[in-house]
Image (tube, helix red, strand yellow):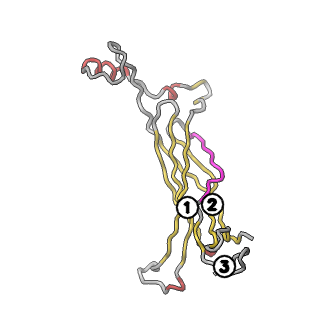
């Protein structure tokens, strides 16, 4: 059991909300985006809430986007949601792929525009059984702490979005002391 530096007492531990410290994305091609970054996972003391232990982890999530087709407005009534069946057939014929997919030059694709949203939630797991399925004595059980990273990537041109998720964890005994 760790000792709190402020209170100078033995304290219980509580998981802190993980913080995404940095994030970056690269487009491998028009449909594949890789989001990477760093996450700070902290463990706070139960008495005063100061950080007692921490771990810095890296994540890398690949997301594949299925771009939406852009449908032009109805020629007869200039509405995108026309109920006339003849107009709907004509609109489907004129539908094109995302305009960003057509945006390229001699050297290859121009830089696509994506909006990235990254969220981190706390994660804790206790290993209670060994590899053979036998229960582990409670003093020898391992606790793993970390974060669940959720990424949502949205194309700024067509509005298509896709997401990915990764679970990061590290054994609690290997967290570094904060002081």
Q: Earlier in the sequence, mark 1 or mark 2?
A: 2
Spatial distance from mark 1 to mark 3, Cα to Cα? 22 Å
> Image check: 107 left or right of 76?
right
Q: Is residue 21 magenta?
A: yes
- Dot label at residue 176: none
Q: Is residue 169 visible?
A: yes
User: 10 Å neighbourhood of mark 2: few (<14), some, or many (≥20)?
Assistant: some
Identify the secondary structure beneath mark 1.
strand
Residue with the most extreme right position: 179
Identify the secondary structure beneath mark 3.
loop
In percent of width and height, residue 147 lies at 55, 61
Residue ID for mark 3: 2
Spatial distance from mark 2 to mark 3, Cα to Cα? 22 Å
Q: What span is colored magenta in the figure?
A: 18-28
- Please say if the residues under marks 1 and 2 sit with CB atoms less than 8 Å apart: yes
The N terminus, quarter of image? bottom right
- Dot label at residue 57: 2
At 63% from the left and 48% from the top, the residue drawn is 23
In percent of width and height, residue 107 lies at 62, 28
Residue ID for mark 1: 147
Identify the secondary structure beneath mark 2.
strand
Residue 45 vertical placement versus 78 (above, below): below
> Image check: 84 left or right of 163?
left
Say how many tags the image has. Answer: 3
Spatial distance from mark 1 to mark 2, Cα to Cα? 9 Å
Residue 131 vertical placement versus 164 (above, below): below
Residue 69 vertical placement versus 135 (above, below): above
At 69% from the left and 70% from the top, the residue drawn is 176
Q: Is residue 85 magenta?
A: no
């Amino acid at each position: 059991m760790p000792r709190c530096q402020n209170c100078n007492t033995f304290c219980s531990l509580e998981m802190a909300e993980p913080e995404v410290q940095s994030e970056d994305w690269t487009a491998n091609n028009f449909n594949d985006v890789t989001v990477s970054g760093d996450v700070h996972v902290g463990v706070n003391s139960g008495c005063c809430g100061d950080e007692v232990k921490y771990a810095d982890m890296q994540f890398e999530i690949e997301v594949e986007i299925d771009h939406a087709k852009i449908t032009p407005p109805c020629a007869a009534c200039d509405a995108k949601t026309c109920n006339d069946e003849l107009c709907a057939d004509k609109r489907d014929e004129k539908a094109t792929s995302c305009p960003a997919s057509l945006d390229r030059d001699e050297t290859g694709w121009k830089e696509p525009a994506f909006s990235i949203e990254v969220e981190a939630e706390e994660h804790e797991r206790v290993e209670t059984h060994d590899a053979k399925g036998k229960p582990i004595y409670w003093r020898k059980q391992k606790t793993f702490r970390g974060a669940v990273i959720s990424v949502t990537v949205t194309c700024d041109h067509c509005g298509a979005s896709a997401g990915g998720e990764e679970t990061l964890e590290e054994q609690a005994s290997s967290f570094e002391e904060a002081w």
